[in-house]
Image (cartoon, helix red, strand yellow):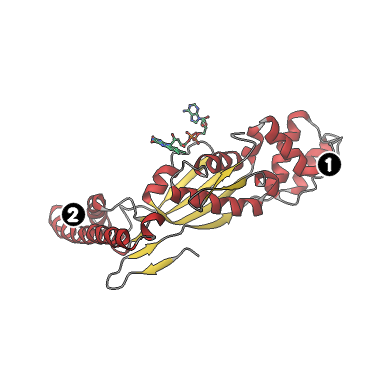
């Protein structure tokens, strides 16, 4: 669970850690795979029981119809070789669905820059009332009581301004948009009021991505130069992905950084 602490005296909640929910993974239609193999006079079975790995291996083997006499080492060796030679398109066939929560709008602004192989659905600040919003505090600020107090004051001020603006806009638009339905009026009020919300505002984003795109994300956002919040997310995502598919993701190593955090590196960059 993400760390969430209530702030005494206000309804502002402060979040210091992202949460990842793995909502979907692939399955293999074994009968259809067998039918394809039989139609082509071969029999083959991957030694992996993980659908993402079986599907990636199958995709790679289709390229050369190399089902009949596979090299030793099984799925792990096969996908290792794919990464080694940079046959990255094969990894696009492994796909997962995630929900990220407890992340800031600044994080998701960086996340959605990853276009290729990613799909997104993000919480709408136009439709959803942010008067119960939570805020993500950067670790470097949370660790210092003076900076924390300054940050909280700024967030509280922005939050209060949002609530007051939304209320007054609602009242004003009740006249100006008298013919419109309640949802449209609220949307019009919230979309204007949200302009004062900070980058720290918590958001939720549903993310679908393939293994090749995820690897590029892990490399660029797990690197020492990446912004710390997204680097933490990359580290947590790697933990999930290594469990999901050791063959596709266990080549990453965590290298300690002077500030006590770590960066992610791999010998197989940008496959
Ligand atoms: C440490 C760090 C600092 C950053 N700072 C800034 C910044 O100051 N300002 C800023 O605007 N962005 C910044 N970025 C974002 C960065 O420029 C990329 O937009 C982001 O990392 C996504 O990478 P990408 O475009 O490779 O990913 P994707 O869009 O997922 O693309 C993946 C790969 O597909 C290929 N590709 C995708 N689209 C095209 C295309 N149209 N034409 C040709 N090839 C394509 C490329 O090989 C690309 O690397 C930063 C990123 C990092 C990691």
Instruction: Specify whether 153 is left or right of 22.
Output: left
Write the residue at 87% across / 35% down.
69
Write down the quadrant of residue 243 in the picture: bottom right
Q: Residue 236 appears at what percent x and percent y?
A: 55, 54
Q: Is ligand 1 within 8 Å of the beta carbon of the residue shown at mark 1?
A: no
Does label 2 point to a residue whose CB lies under 8 Å from ligand 1?
A: no
Work out which residue is located at the far front of the displayed protein and give it: 258
Is there any visible trace of residue 136 in the rendered image? no
Q: Quadrant of residue 173?
A: bottom left
Q: Is 193 placed left or right of 106 in the picture? A: left
Q: Where residue 205 sits in the image (x, y, percent)? A: 45, 52
Residue 41 placement (x, y as % from top left): 86, 35
Q: Residue at x 66, y 35 (%)?
A: 90
Residue toward you, 209 or 232? 232
Name, please, the residue furthest toward the bottom: 9
Q: Which residue is at 62% across, 38% downward?
A: 92
Q: Which residue is mark 1?
A: 44
Q: Nearer the viewer, residue 107 or 146?
A: 146
Q: Is residue 195 left or right of residue 255?
A: left
- Number of on-image labels: 2
Check disc 2 and report the residue beneath it. Answer: 179
Q: Quadrant of residue 162?
A: bottom left
Regarding mark 1 in the picture, which secondary structure is present there? loop
């Amino acid at each position: 669970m993400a760390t969430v602490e209530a702030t005494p005296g206000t309804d502002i909640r402060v979040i210091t850690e992202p949460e990842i929910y793995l909502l979907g993974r692939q399955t293999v239609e074994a009968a259809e795979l067998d039918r394809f193999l039989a139609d082509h006079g071969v029999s083959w079975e991957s030694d992996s029981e993980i659908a993402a790995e079986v599907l990636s291996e199958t995709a790679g083997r289709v390229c050369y119809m190399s089902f009949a006499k596979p090299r030793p080492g099984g799925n792990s060796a096969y996908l290792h070789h794919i990464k080694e030679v940079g046959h990255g398109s094969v990894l696009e066939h492994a796909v997962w669905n995630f929900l990220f929560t407890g992340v800031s709008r600044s994080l998701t602004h960086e996340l959605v820059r990853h276009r290729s192989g990613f799909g997104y659905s993000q919480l709408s600040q136009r439709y959803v009332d942010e008067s119960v919003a939570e805020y993500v505090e950067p670790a470097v600020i949370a660790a210092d009581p003076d900076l924390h107090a300054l940050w909280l004051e700024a967030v509280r001020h922005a939050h209060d301004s949002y609530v007051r603006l939304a209320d007054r806009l609602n009242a004003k638009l009740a006249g100006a948009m008298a013919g419109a339905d309640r949802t449209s009026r609220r949307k019009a009020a919230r979309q204007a009021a949200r302009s004062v919300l900070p980058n720290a505002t918590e958001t939720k984003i549903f993310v679908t991505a393939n293994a090749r795109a995820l690897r590029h994300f892990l490399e660029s956002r797990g690197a020492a130069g990446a912004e710390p919040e997204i680097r933490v997310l990359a580290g947590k995502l790697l933990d999930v992905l290594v469990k999901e598919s050791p063959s596709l993701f266990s080549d990453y190593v965590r290298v300690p950084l002077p500030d006590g955090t770590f960066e992610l590196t791999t010998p197989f960059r940008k496959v």
